[in-house]
Amino acid sequence: SLKKLRELDLSTNSVNKIELLAFNESSKLQILKLRNNQLSTLPDGSFWGLITLKKLILDDNQIEHVRLNWTFGLSSLQELSLKRNSIKNISIGSFGPMKRLNKLLLSDNQIQKLQGGIFDGLKELQVLRLGNNQVNFIDENIFHRLDSLETLDLSHNFLSWSFERTRGLFSKLPNLLKLRLNNNKIRLLRSNTFDGCEKVKELDLSSNPLTTIEPEVFTRLHDLEILNFNST
């Protein structure tokens, strides 16, 4: 019995499957690390019973799809890391059960589209990292209701087309402090691109082939302290 276990590290093994209710007896577990294994799918209810889990690390696996049913029961989770997997799809509502999540790390995957609704319910999220993916489409309402978000990393994607045609993408992020948009092939900054970014202190636009910057694009960035335009 592992009823008193608080931290479990199963990293760098050959784990390729998590059985249903595998952690049902570990109700006091707070940190679970499954980094660098061979997980490609996670069955429904994979983490059911982990009612006190605060940190779940699934980096360096082969996960392709984030689905709602395997996140059930993670109501206390504060940090979820899925870096360096093969994630292509995120089902709408997948993160819904994680009402207390404040850090979501999805860097270095193969995500192409950020559909509206996939981050709904994450009212306490402070850090969202989506760098080094293949994102070429962002729904204009994708970040709505993320009222607590302070750090947003969208670097190293393909946002040119979507970014230039989407208006008010960041307008519902009242507490955003750091925004990374470097290496995205962005050519145009519209005058309303940064509407709602009044509190942003750090903005990285480096390594973009910018050709047009409309007037007053930075007017609303009242608290900006660091601006990176470096093209190299």
Image: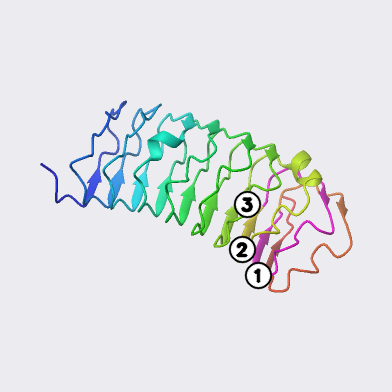
Looking at numbered disc 2 in the image, what kind of residue is underneath it? Leu
Please give left or right for residue 69 compared with residue 224 in the image: left
| Residue annotated with mark 1 | 199
Q: Are marks 1 and 2 in contact (CB under 8 Å)?
A: yes
As displayed, is residue 102 above or below residue 96?
Answer: below
Residue 37 vertical placement versus 188 (above, below): above
| Left or right of residue 139, residue 91 in this image | left
- Distance of label 1 from label 2 (alpha carbons): 6 Å
Residue drawn at x 18%, y 41% is 25
Q: Position of residue 219 (x, y in %)?
A: 81, 69
Dot 1: within a 10 Å radius of its alpha carbon, few (fewer than 14), some, or many (20 or more) residues?
Answer: some
- In the shown orientation, is residue 232 left or right of residue 27? right
Outermost residue on the bottom side: it is: 223
Q: Tell me the SS state at disc 1.
A: loop
Quadrant assignment, res 117: top right
Q: Which residues are magenta?
A: 181-205
26, above or below 91, in the image: below
- Which residue carries the number 3 mark? 143
* Image point (52%, 43%), residue name: 107
**Which sits earlier in the primary sequence, circle 1 or circle 2?**
2
Question: Dominant secondary structure of the magenta stretch?
Answer: loop
The CA span between labels 1 and 3 is: 16 Å
Q: Are marks 3 and 2 in contact (CB under 8 Å)?
A: no
Quadrant showing the N terminus? top left
Please, what secondary structure does the residue beneath circle 2 have? loop
Residue 58 shown left or right of residue 5 in the figure: right
Residue 11 position in % (x across, y down):
29, 39
Q: Are marks 1 and 3 in contact (CB under 8 Å)?
A: no
